[in-house]
Structures are given as C-alpha cells and as structure tokens.
C-alpha cells in the first residue's frame, strides 16, 4: 500500500512542483486519505493563483440587447422577433474569468466538497476559495475535453492544478447506478501507472542533473532503411551520461510475475522482458554494450519481489522492485541504486 505522503512526493516530482513555495508546507502535513491530499494541494495552489489573478480570456457571448455591440445577427433577430422589442441579437467577446481552466477548478472543488472525505479544516479552505469563483460556471465532469487544454505564458501556472483536477475527476470520481457521484479512496492502476511514469521521469531529472534525462524515441536498427509500418518505440525514461545509457521501463501492475500452468513455475512477465530487450538492442546499434535496461516494477502484494541482473548478448538487463510503501528516505535509497545501474 502506498503511503499518502508518498503520493504527494510522486505528484510533486511528476508535475515539477517540489520547489514551488505554495506547496512546500504540505510536506509537513498528515493526511487521512487521498481526497484530503488533493484538497490540500488545490487549496495552496488555487489560493496562490488568486493572488496572482485568475486567468481571463475573451469569451464569445450571444444575446438580444438594445445596447448594440459586436456583430449584429440580423437573421436571428428577425427569426426571434427581437426587433419588435427594440432589441437585436448580437455576438461579441467579453473579457471574463469564466474560462475553461477556472471552470475545471471550480467543478473539482465542489466535487471534493460534496463527495470527498475531506477534513473540516480543508473543507473550510475549499469553501472560502469558491467565493472567488462566483462568476465562473461549472462543467459536466465527464465531458471535459482534457486534450483540448493548451498552456501558454499567461496560464502556465495552472498546469499543476489542472493535472490534479484531472486525477480527481478521472481517477477518483465514479457514477453510481442511480446516476449520483461517489469518490474512490484510491487511484486505479491505470491512473497510478501514468503517475508512476511521470514521477520517475521527474525524479531523475531533478535529483540527477548530471544525467541527460528524457522519454526518448528509439530508432529501429534496420539494415535497409525501410521502417514502414514498424511501431514507434518510446522509452519511459532514458538516462544518458557520457557514452553510457540506461533505459528504464516503468511498470505499475497488480502483478509482476507470470505462472506457467504446465509446470506451475513463476517467471518475469515475458512481454515486459521482450520489450526492454528490444529497446536496448535497437539503441545499442554498434553493439558496444554501453546500453543497459531495467524493468522497474512498483511493489505488489506478491510474495516474490524481483531483484535480478542478467547479462544477455553483451548488455546488462535488470529487473528491480520499488517499494512505494516505505518511508520516503528508503524510496530515495532504492532509486539511487537504480541510477547506479548505468
């Protein structure tokens, strides 16, 4: 079981928020559940955003008005008989706080207030913040188009907050058979897998600046240059230092081992091993042996926790287990051991 405090560190590294002043105090807090942690992060982040000023943008408006503005829609004015009332249908832009970003923040705060198991102190904090969003509308939680959100210089400070909102809505929020909402206590494996990948990438970027760290594409080592229909290969994390390269494939699954039904023996999941083998061998185009690979599993409830190293065809392959239920200091120690596999 992952400790709630460790989820905070994972979020902070994943979204590059570890050194942001508004979130530092959270490290010293204790949380009874994930709802409470999400609420605390939003309270700090949204409070700071309010001090900076809520993001505003030009929002398209349409109304029948006697004070003509913007573009007059004669056709709809005739259809709606607004002319008889000395009004015209007008289309215009209004500089407003009622933007999609603020709508997502307000929607998430209200969901946590209504359905989250949030301690009273944080409930008061969320309610206090909603007063600043009185002119902002709410959204249908399940019809938010997350992929359409674009960040730029004027709204970049929203990125961490919107990512947290997405985790709350997509990872915790459920619709019951009666159509009502309820919130899960834990993020599902799919959401945790994505967070796990982002956390590891962010951690190595932050804590190992001497390495070049990225999620890089790997070219197929083809003989004739033809790559038509070959799938793209993209590593979760690639660490490079001088001539050495370490490819890390992050795995957050309910199990780390597979069982052979014929012989009833356990082995590493074959598809995972084939994948990291393919990455390493295609990256090590000249066969130098300077490219290594590691499957980094998050610890499960299984009795076997892989901790193995193999030398295959001149390259080193490791299968390691990261116990996210340990104290943070121990997690850092485990990750430092992974970094030395270069």
Image (cartoon, rainbow, N blue to C red):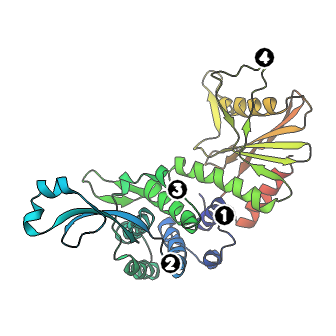
Between discs 2 and 4, the one toward the N terminus: 2
* Residue 121 visible to an observer of this rendering: yes
Q: Are marks 1 and 3 in contact (CB under 8 Å)?
A: no
Closer mark to the observer between disc 1 and disc 4 = 4
- Residue at 30% x, 53% y: name it: 176
Between discs 1 and 4, the one toward the N terminus: 1
The residue that label 2 is drawn on is 53
The residue that label 4 is drawn on is 224
Image quadrant holding the N terminus, namely bottom right
Viewer-proximal residue, 227 or 212? 227
How many angstroms separate mark 2 from mark 3 (CA)? 19 Å
How many angstroms separate mark 2 from mark 4 (CA)? 57 Å
The residue that label 3 is drawn on is 150
Q: Which mark is residue 28?
A: none
Q: Secondary structure at mark 2?
A: loop
Query: Is 303 left, or right, of 163 in this rendering?
Result: right
Between discs 2 and 3, the one toward the N terminus: 2
How many angstroms separate mark 4 from mark 3 (CA)? 40 Å
The residue that label 1 is drawn on is 16
How many angstroms separate mark 1 from mark 2 (CA)? 21 Å
């Amino acid at each position: 079981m992952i400790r709630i405090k460790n989820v905070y560190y994972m979020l902070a590294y994943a979204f590059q928020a570890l050194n942001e002043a508004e979130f530092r105090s959270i490290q010293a807090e204790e949380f009874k559940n994930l709802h409470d942690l999400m609420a605390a992060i939003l309270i700090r982040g949204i409070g700071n955003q309010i001090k900076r000023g809520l993001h505003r943008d030009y929002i398209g408006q349409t109304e029948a008005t006697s004070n003509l503005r913007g573009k007059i829609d004669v056709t709809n004015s005739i259809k709606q008989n607004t002319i008889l009332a000395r009004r015209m249908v007008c289309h215009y832009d209004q500089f407003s706080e009622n933007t999609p970003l603020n709508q997502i923040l307000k929607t998430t705060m209200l969901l946590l207030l209504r359905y989250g198991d949030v301690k009273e102190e944080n409930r008061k904090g969320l309610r206090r913040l909603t007063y600043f969003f009185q002119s902002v509308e709410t959204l249908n939680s399940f019809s938010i188009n997350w992929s359409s959100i674009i960040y730029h210089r004027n709204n970049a400070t929203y990125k961490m907050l919107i990512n947290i909102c997405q985790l709350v809505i997509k990872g915790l929020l459920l619709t019951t058979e009666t159509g009502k909402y309820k919130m899960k206590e834990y993020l599902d494996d799919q959401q945790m897998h994505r967070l796990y990948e982002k956390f590891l990438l962010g951690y190595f970027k932050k804590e190992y600046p001497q390495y070049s760290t990225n999620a890089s594409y790997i070219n197929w080592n083809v003989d004739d240059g033809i790559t038509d229909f070959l799938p793209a290969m993209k590593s979760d994390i690639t660490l490079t230092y001088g001539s050495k390269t370490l490819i890390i494939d992050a795995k957050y699954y309910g199990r780390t081992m597979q069982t052979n039904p014929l012989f009833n023996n356990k082995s590493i999941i074959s598809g995972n091993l084939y994948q990291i083998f393919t990455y390493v061998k295609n990256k090590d185009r000249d066969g130098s042996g300077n490219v290594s690979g590691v499957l980094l599993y998050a610890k499960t409830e299984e009795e076997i926790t892989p901790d193995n190293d193999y030398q295959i065809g001149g390259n080193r392959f490791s299968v390691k287990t990261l116990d996210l239920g340990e104290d943070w200091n121990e997690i850092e120690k485990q990750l430092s051991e992974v970094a030395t596999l270069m």
